[in-house]
Image: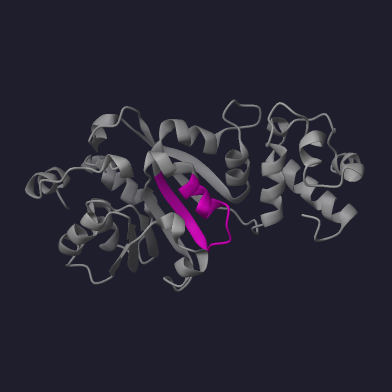
Amino acid sequence: MIDAKKLIKEYSLTPNKALGQNFLVDENALMQIVGFSRCEGAEVLEIGPGLGTLTNELAGRAKNVVAVEIDKRMCELLKRTLSGHKNTHIINGDILKLKNDELTSLFSGEFIVAANLPYYITSQTAMKFIDSDLPIKHMVLMMQQEAAAHFIAGVKEKCYTPVSVISNRYFEMDEALRLSPASYYPAPAVNSSVLVFKRKDAPYDKGLSRLIKAAFSMRRKTLKNNLSAILPKASVDEIILNAGLAPVSRAEELTSDDFVRLTESARLILGADAI
């Protein structure tokens, strides 16, 4: 196991605040996260490996690990700390700028995602994988507790957003662990959560995601008003009623299954390419 605190001291490392670097230094939490990953013999994508503490443990169990790190300094350090693992490939790059076909080309098939997500890009990064057709088996994501609430929120809850609906459509989610600021260096001002996402047997539907986002576009407005922005106004009432819903409903009242029926209804009435 890599001693994070010793490594920081040895290399006089200063975390980059602009990149949201908070290194996990809690070894007990680290090993629990490794367990949640269930990565034995699997292919793994790690986002933001930082010091390589998690990467080292994943590499000792997985078939291969691709670690994407935006900080060039950390990439140089990773080459040294992970030199004993021949199954690890380090990429210096921005995960948000890597195209999906570039990612899939790095693996032979399904892969697992593990990440300690920088707070400032948590939602964008997580949704890159959730709202996509990437062949992801499951994910273990560390994030700010406040951000985690949006992924696991239920209908009518304050945090219920498109993130909640889309995540629920494609994944079973579990808040597996909560971490205090003391688990990180430097200690953030907030608590963190570890969410485990297990893939459901639901084919990805880009049109469904588009409809969900449109329905939430103006939260205080009705479903009819919001959907009229992307669907012919004359057909919106019929589409909503055909899905077994009321035009005066609001997005925050609908489940992911409701949105699936809405999408199917729009395609039935307007044609397959309507959404």
The residue drawn where x is 71% and y is 26% is 220
- Is residue 57 positioned above or below 143 on the image? below
Q: Is residue 20 visible?
A: no
What range of the chain is rendered magenta? 124-141
Residue 229's spot in the image, x, y percent?
78, 42
- Magenta stretch containing residue 125, yes or no? yes
The residue drawn where x is 13% and y is 45% is 8
- Report whether 153 appears left or right of 109: right
- Magenta stretch containing residue 131, yes or no? yes
- Is residue 269 positioned above or below 103 on the image? above
Looking at the rendered image, the quarter that the C terminus falls into is: bottom right
- Report whether 211 appears left or right of 164: right
Residue 104's spot in the image, x, y percent?
48, 69
Residue 23's spot in the image, x, y percent?
25, 43
The residue drawn where x is 45% and y is 30% is 146
Tally of marks: 0
Residue 28's spot in the image, x, y percent?
24, 41
Indicate the quadrant where residue 81 lies. bottom left
- Report whether 163 appears left or right of 97: right
- Is residue 221 positioned above or below 195 on the image? above
Front-most of residues 171 and 266: 266
Q: Which of the colour schemes (rainbow, by chain, secondary structure, one colour) is used?
A: one colour
Q: Is residue 156 visible?
A: yes
